[in-house]
Image: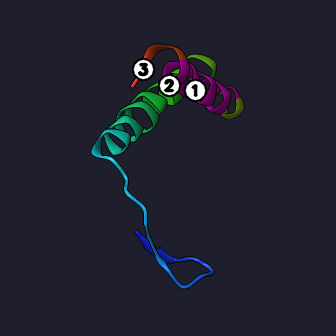
Amino acid sequence: MIAMNKKGEFVFYVIEKRSIRKFLVVDMLIGSALYYGTFIIYHHIGVSMVSSMIGTTGIRRFIWKG
């Protein structure tokens, strides 16, 4: 992504391949699996959303160190 700052200089933002892969694996795949698994068990959208958020946050903080 290219942007201009207030001084008129170009600023380049670099997104690493590792960050994209981590997002896709943890947030999209594991988060969806946690959501649907919890929804099948409890049949409640709120519980499913919260378990998905807590699960992905826990995985990113404690398990996936990279």
Q: Nearer the viewer, residue 3 or 41?
A: 3
Circle 1: residue type: Thr
Mark 1–mark 2 contact, CB under 8 Å? yes
Residue 48 placed where, x, y %? 62, 28
Mark 3 residue type: Trp
10 left or right of 61? left
Q: Is 41 left, or right, of 64 in this rendering? A: right
Q: Which residues are magenta?
A: 47-61
Q: Residue furthest left?
A: 17
Q: Count how many numbered circles sit on residues in the image.
A: 3
On the image, numbered disc 3 is attached to which residue? Answer: 64
User: How crowded is the residue under tag 1: few (<14 C-alpha within 10 Å), some, or many (20+)?
Assistant: some
Q: Secondary structure at mark 1?
A: helix
Q: Mark 1 or mark 3: which comes first in sequence?
A: 1
Rendered image: mark on residue 57: 1
Residue topped by disc 2: 60
Q: Nearer the viewer, residue 23 or 16?
A: 16
Q: Label 3 vs label 2: CA separation?
A: 5 Å
